[in-house]
Image (tube, grey):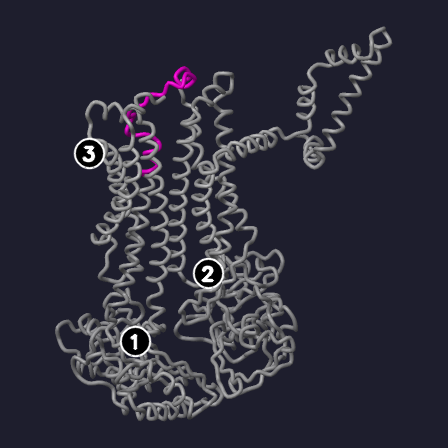
Amino acid sequence: MPWKELARRILYLGRRSRFEAELADEIQFHIEMRADELEQSGLSRSDALAQASREFGHATRAREEARAAWQFRWIEDLVGDLRYAGRALRHSPGFAATAILSLALGIGVNTAIFSLTTEFIFSQPSCRRPETLVALRIGGSSHSPIEQYRFLRDAHIFPGLAGLREQDEANWRNGDDTYRLWAVRVTSNFFEVTGVPVAFGRPIQDADEHVTVLTDHFWRNRLGADPKVLGRTLILDGQGFTVVGVLPRNHHTLTGFGFSPDLYVPDDKTYVALYARLPEGMTRQEAFDRLHSACEELDKVYPRQEQRWSKGIRVSGIGGFERLALAESIPIGAFFAMLIIVVALLLLIACANVASLLLARASSRRHELALRLAIGATRGRIVRQLLAESLLLALSGTAAGLALNLSLTALFNRIQLPLPIPIRLLIQPDGRLLLYSALLALLSALLAGLGPAIAATRVELNPALKQAEHQVAGRRWNLRNALVVGQLAVSMLLLTAGSLFLRNLVKATTMEPGFDIDHTIWAYVRLVPGRYASHGRIRAFIDSELELVRSMPGVEAATIVSAVPLNDRWHTQERFRVDHGENVIEMRYPFNFVGPEYFRTMGIPILAGREFRASDSEGVVILNESFARRVFGARSPVSHTLRFRNEPPVTVIGLARDAKYVSLGEESTPTLYMPYFRKSVSMVNLHFMIRASHRPAELVKALNKRLGEIDPSTSIEVKPMRESMGLALLPSRVGAALLGSMGVLGLCLAAVGLYGVLFYAVSRRIREIGVRVALGAGPGDILCAVFGESFWLVGLGMAIGLGVALLATRPLAMFLVPDLSPADPASYIVVSAILALVATLATVSPALHALRIDPMTALRYE
């Protein structure tokens, strides 16, 4: 189409009324001009106008031909079809409301999960030109020492290179209380390189020290949205930091995944993740080559034994799938992929429901459609008209679904997950949501409307025009029945997945993790780093705290631990030798540094040997059962020697019972324990475990006060161990809530579909039922006929759903506890019973309707 013609047609869309008025004036002008000529030849004015009109021809056709040169015909036809569809649906408000509600539920849940996924995984970081900002890895590590950062920065291989340590903490002294804050420590050029915007104030700049930029959440919730916050001093880790800026409300960190710290502070003494600004036109490969060359020089200046800096180099984007790969968060991606598949299945059920309604509506319009076909309408034209009705329903359902989306996403934004780092969602509608909603509307219109539209045009004209519809049982297998079977099969799949996660939650809640969670308290204490620079001073503090705690009434035992079971990342090791053997054993296993009385405090039995003593710091370890069985078989490991890489040999002094360490779903894991004070690195993050002789909750306040007596600058968090199980139970809780609710919703939609099919089948068989009753059929025979059709549909749907569920639920094994299998028969039995019960309830009303049919009325039924 030429550009001028395209521009003319687009121009017409904005001046339709003016065009119609000008066209009418022009037609009238031509008629009157011809009438003037005829009047001059002797005709009267009225006869001249009549003759001129006849000569001009049909004015409406002339208007249509004139418009055709200006219009997009398909748009005009679509608008006309939608107008007709709107009038038709207004005459069937019950049908329209039911269809729109079904689609609103399916589309609303889909858009809500889409919004959650895009916010959590694909949120765009708040920075300048994110497409030219990349994350760097060198030496196979996500973070590099500050010396290596400075070397690469000063090499000027990129226009800008900045660093940050995202998951760090700071003690905030506010009056007489001390609180733990999540601080992002950044190099002083971070804001300049990344272009992270501030809402008011200014960012951290070069040469800045002891300044901070606050996040909006911290400013509003902890400082009361103080408008005079700029220039205020916050005491962080015992030093004053001046507030110079506040970030926007919709700030998204470079880390992503909803990570939401409290503030940013400059720091040039830590390990940092590297972010580089690429120059205009530079490709990732060119950036990689530059970085590789610089790292080869880095190997010469800062050589290291474990891995060269020029190995394990990566240049990655800071958003989307690249961020997911950078974080190595495959379980996160798998979880969201599972959610998207589940809500897509739910939408399929909703579309099948609407398709069943459209089939019933088309059946009631057989005479109208046959009449239109008889007078010349093509099947394609009627299909297009029926699809317009489906599209209007889909658009209305999408609008209602978006309203549901706003409610669900507002709920998501308020949820605080029990995670070790602060995660806050900032889900807001955007262009991606609107585009996704439009695609869902078109897809729903086709899925729900195309099949019924094609089926509706396959009518025999003579019987349909005579309204001579056969009123006996038809084919058992038709499109409506196939849709219901599909709904039931998908519902079976969703309910099975929800049932698995619900049973997983029950098992995880009641299972024994291998240690006592009913009498144990976890106290987290964070020291001010500057005050505890030496290992000796930290040990003196720990000893003093343990002495105070153990002297408290109600405390049976107390200890110190490096990683808290089911709440922290454990250290891992891979290579060691047994005794003086030459063979190196390759086995990846976690290990933990624990203090004296750890096993007594946690309620973990020592099966052989002894616990650590206060005098133990080097040369001894304790193994768990799985480690001992894997390495020593049936022999006792006590008194054997292990040799680790580049470390002195150690002697096994004890054998502990297996427990859960990282997750409730883990199998028996070989694990090793080392004395806490074997560590030579000064640690300011301390985890105290306390065993209470009675209810732990009664000791929380007293412990919080007692632990703060030695140093008020420490931040302290104390909670019973059972309350700290939220992280371990999170996958089960989320899975049970989301998949369970999706399964129930899908079951309700499937039940409505089954009810509609059966009720429609009874209404189509009124004459047949009347004949049967007149010939002597009893109520039991009628009930058997109705329930028989119902159970045939339900049985087929359950059989298909069972087969699909056995295959589709296998990937869920990664989220389940070890003794629960996706093929567990109990889940399928329970789900089958629920589905059968709901199907029976959905069949009752159609069956009662069939029993109430009067034979005489039925025999006269037309």
Q: Is residue 684 left or right of residue 239?
A: left
**What is the span of residues highlighted in magenta in the rendered image?**
461-485
**Callout 1 crowding tier (Cα within 10 Å): few <14, some 14–19, many ≥20:** many
Please give the residue where the numbered disc 2 appears in the rendered image: 412
Residue at mark 3 to residue at mark 2: CA–CA distance: 51 Å
Residue 99 pos. (x, y %): 44, 40
Mark 2 lies on a secondary structure that is helix
Identified by mark 1, the residue type is Phe
Residue 201 pos. (x, y %): 66, 73
Residue at figure coordinates x 23%, y 23% from the top left: 774
Pointers 1 and 3 in contact (C-beta within 8 Å): no
Label 1 or label 3, whichever lies nearer to me, is 3
Please give the residue where the numbered disc 3 appears in the rendered image: 780
Q: Is residue 67 left or right of residue 349?
A: right
Above or below: residue 468 compared with residue 170:
above
Residue at mark 1 to residue at mark 3: CA–CA distance: 70 Å
The mark that comes first in sequence, 3 or 2, is: 2
The label number, if any, that marks residue 591 in the structure image: 1
Residue at mark 1 to residue at mark 2: CA–CA distance: 36 Å
Above or below: residue 148 compared with residue 546:
above
Above or below: residue 136 compared with residue 833:
below
**Callout 2 crowding tier (Cα within 10 Å): few <14, some 14–19, many ≥20:** some
Quarter of the image with the N terminus in it = top right
Label 3 or label 2, whichever lies nearer to me, is 3
The mark that comes first in sequence, 1 or 2, is: 2
Number of numbered discs present?
A: 3
Q: Nearer the viewer, residue 99 or 726?
A: 99
Identified by mark 3, the residue type is Gly
Rendered image quadrant of residue 862: top left
Above or below: residue 295 compared with residue 116:
below
